[in-house]
């Protein structure tokens, strides 16, 4: 009798500690966690990607359209950039909102510095970039963009971190690329490159942190800055693509962050075309074009470089296509439901997580078999951000 | 689309045309309830990609009543249907009728929550 009572207690106790309880911190690593943005409800879920389960729901994050996330170098804290200018710091182990500030009127993503000291946020309103302490989100530096009228500055886009405590971003309205050096935070240095091309809409940095590349909406080609040699200025690459060809209207701007590099080859979304462009990384010349299902939004390489995964703009956003990087052939087309908004690879590439907005779930696929492995509920999910981003430049 | 639906749509278009000619104004036959909720969804999700899900602005300007109050229903619906060449604002004509664009313009001016 006594013994069985004891074992009952033991079972109850075991159950209690194994069930995730919000607001109670977990003793575990964070390397396999992810944050899933639920943009309609202004909330986010902390997901355990190993056991494929939800750990926490974090609420009160504001307007999360186009939200993105960076991680502290210890992978414990996530910084969420919301559209309403909100900057939220989330504790991934406790599922709590540590701090939230509204730092601007309207913003579009951010970055964390190489050593993790600074968080930079890119703002549409008031146009410019603000830099905060990653510790307590206090303002360190405010850098307004070039003025375009008495009360408006250019929108800033494509903000990334670069080696040497630097940030790089583009100015949409004035066609510039700026390099912000925060090595000495008391005296930040700004280098401005003007006339880089019309309407840069997004930017990326190559994974080694050497080249910053801005996509141009207003003209063909891309603007590139070699961060080993900023003194050489911005050069134009791929400027022959699309020339003279009629462009289709663009219903969603492509994202360059995930620009795929596989060996010597780069894959990128063609603006206003149903095509993925294939370029030679050395001469930055176009090698081929792959006709795809719609206008690509994300063109992402698996970490092993073997395949490219592509999703599409409205009205084709129910589809994902997978391209083989050797043959440049589409090997699979999947219809997953309306609103396939984001794809995120496990750091070693064995799996990819895909959000399907209107199905209210995220899916995990095996990248080898291309078969689904798991399905987790999420309310109108958009971005999925794995904590492994903490250790990658430009993410 | 069924023939029946096509006929109704054509009749609707014709009616708007005649109405428009008669009054010189845009008189919209409002879309039905199901289509209205589709359009609001489109507004939040797909217009939201550039204008923000809460329409407070993004790459494109805010579409809140105070931001576009100065524009007429006609200017707004024409902008929606034909886009603004030279800017990222695309034409939505392939995805909605003029009546629907006029209805959407009215909703924008009134405010969408």
Image (cartoon, coloured by chain):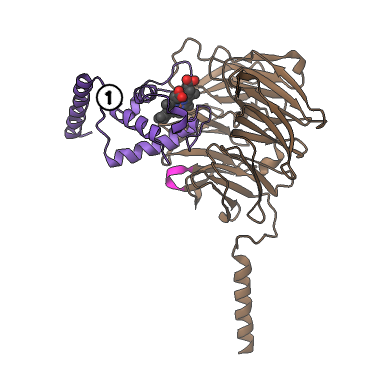
Q: Within 10 angstroms of label 1, few (less than 14), some, or many (20 or more) residues?
A: some
- Picture coordinates of residue B58, whole percent (x, y): 53, 30
Horizontally, residue A56 falls left or right of residue A138, namely: left
Give the quadrant of the N terminus of chain B.
top left
Q: Position of residue A71 (x, y in %)?
A: 68, 43
Residue at far bottom of view:
A1
Figure label count? 1
Return the residue at label 1: B26
Q: Main secondary structure of the magenta part?
A: helix
Q: Which image quarter holds the C terminus of chain B?
A: top left
Picture layout, residue A188 above or below residue A362: above
Quarter of the image holding residue A172? top right
- Numbered range of the magenta stretch: A356-360
Give the left or right position of residue A219, taking residue A17 as reference: left
A151 or A259, which lies in front? Answer: A151
Instruction: Identify the residue at horizontal 37%, vertical 21% (top origin).
Output: B75
Q: Chain of mark 1?
A: B
Does residue A317 show up?
no
> At which x and y percent is residue A186?
82, 31
How far across and down, in percent of the image, does residue B4 sit? 16, 34
Q: Is residue A257 above or below residue A387?
A: above
Give me the chain that's brown.
A
Instruction: Tell me if I can see residue A188 in this picture.
Output: yes
């Amino acid at each position: 009798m006594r013994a069985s009572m004891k074992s009952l207690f033991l079972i109850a106790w075991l159950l209690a500690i194994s069930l995730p309880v919000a607001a109670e911190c977990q003793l575990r690593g964070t390397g396999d966690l992810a944050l899933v943005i639920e943009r309609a409800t202004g909330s986010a879920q902390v997901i355990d990607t190993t056991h494929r389960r939800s750990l926490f729901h974090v609420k009160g994050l504001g307007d999360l359209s186009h939200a993105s996330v960076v991680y502290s170098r210890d992978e414990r804290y996530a910084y969420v950039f919301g559209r309403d200018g909100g900057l939220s710091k989330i504790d991934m182990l406790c599922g709590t909102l540590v701090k939230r500030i509204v730092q601007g009127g309207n913003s579009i993503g951010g970055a964390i510095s190489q050593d993790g000291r600074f968080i930079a946020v890119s703002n549409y309103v008031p146009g410019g970039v603000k830099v905060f302490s990653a510790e307590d989100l206090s303002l360190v530096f405010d850098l307004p963009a070039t003025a375009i009228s008495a009360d408006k500055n250019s929108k800033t886009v494509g903000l990334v971190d670069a080696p040497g405590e630097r940030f790089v971003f583009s100015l949409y309205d004035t066609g510039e690329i700026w390099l912000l050096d925060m090595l000495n935070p008391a005296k930040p240095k700004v280098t401005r490159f003007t006339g880089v091309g019309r309407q840069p809409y997004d930017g990326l940095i190559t994974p080694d942190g050497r080249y910053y590349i801005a996509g141009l909406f207003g003209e063909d080609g891309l603007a590139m800055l070699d961060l080993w040699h900023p003194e050489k200025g911005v050069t134009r690459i791929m400027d022959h693509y699309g020339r003279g060809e009629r462009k289709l209207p663009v219903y969603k701007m492509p994202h360059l962050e995930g620009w795929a590099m596989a060996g010597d080859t780069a894959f990128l979304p063609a603006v206003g075309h149903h095509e993925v462009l294939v370029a030679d990384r050395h001469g930055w010349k176009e090698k081929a074009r792959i006709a795809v299902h719609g206008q690509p939004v994300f063109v992402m390489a698996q970490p092993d470089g073997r395949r490219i995964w592509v999703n599409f703009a409205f009205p084709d956003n129910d589809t994902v296509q997978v391209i083989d990087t050797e043959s440049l052939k589409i090997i699979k087309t999947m219809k997953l439901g309306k609103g396939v908004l984001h794809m995120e690879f496990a750091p070693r590439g064995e799996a990819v997580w895909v959000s399907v907005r209107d199905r209210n779930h995220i899916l995990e696929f095996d990248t080898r078999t291309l078969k689904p492995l798991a399905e987790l509920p999420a309310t109108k999910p958009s971005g999925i951000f794995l904590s492994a981003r903490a250790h990658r430049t430009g993410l | 689309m069924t023939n029946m639906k096509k006929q109704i749509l054509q009749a609707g278009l014709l009616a708007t045309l005649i109405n428009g000619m008669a009054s010189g104004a845009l008189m919209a036959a409002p879309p039905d309830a199901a289509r209205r909720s589709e359009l609001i969804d489109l507004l939040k999700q797909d217009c939201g990609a550039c204008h923000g899900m809460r329409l407070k602005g993004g790459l494109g300007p805010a579409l809140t009543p105070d931001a576009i109050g100065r524009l007429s229903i006609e200017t707004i619906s024409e902008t929606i249907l034909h886009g603004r060449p030279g800017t990222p604002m695309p034409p939505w004509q392939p995805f909605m009728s003029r009546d629907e664009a006029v209805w959407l313009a009215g909703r924008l001016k009134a405010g969408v929550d």
